[in-house]
Amino acid sequence: MLKTRIIPTLLLKNEALVKTVRFAKEEDIPFVHALIQELAAYEKAPQEVTNTVEDMLRDWFGAQPVFRCQVAETDGKVTGMAIYFVKYSTWKGKGVYLDDIVVTESMRRMGIGKLL
């Protein structure tokens, strides 16, 4: 069962409220995908994103999920996300690979990434 981690109401520098860091729901995936596109634009590589919302829905909510995603909500809107997956090392065994943490540009440098 996926759990929601409720953060005690945290007042950020600009007085926006982060109340929840939780696993992404299906309805969050378009916002997560938009954050990925925002990151790609920031990195000056928007053409490199070939992943689609449909791909992400299949790969996270399908029969064999291949990644996990947590989102941060600020004033009820998805403002950040972390995508990660379980990996296996022949020497170390099971581990977690954090692929990306992305916070929307207008909310960066306020501690949301640390919460994720």
Image (cartoon, grey):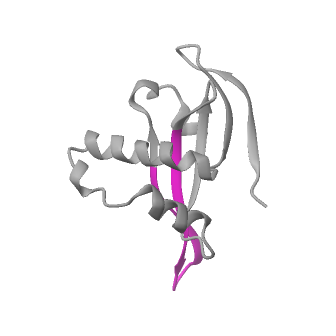
Q: Residue at x 46, y 26 (%)?
A: 107
Task: Return the x and y of residue 49 as percentages of the image width and height.
Answer: 30, 56
Q: Is 24 located above or below residue 74 in the figure?
A: below
Q: How many marks?
A: 0
Q: Which residues are magenta?
A: 80-100
**Residue drawn at x 31%, y 60% as measured from the top left:** 50
With 1 as the anchor, is 72 left or right in this view? left
Outermost residue toward the top in this view: 15
- Residue 13: say if magenta: no
Residue at figure coordinates x 55%, y 38% from the top left: 114
- Give the image quarter of residue 69: bottom right
Quadrant, the C terminus: top right
Quarter of the image with the N terminus in it: bottom right
**On the image, which quarter does residue 22 sit in?**
top right
Check if residue 86 falls in the magenta segment: yes
Q: Main secondary structure of the magenta part?
A: strand
> With respect to residue 82, does 92 lie above or below?
below
Towards the viewer: 62 or 96: 62
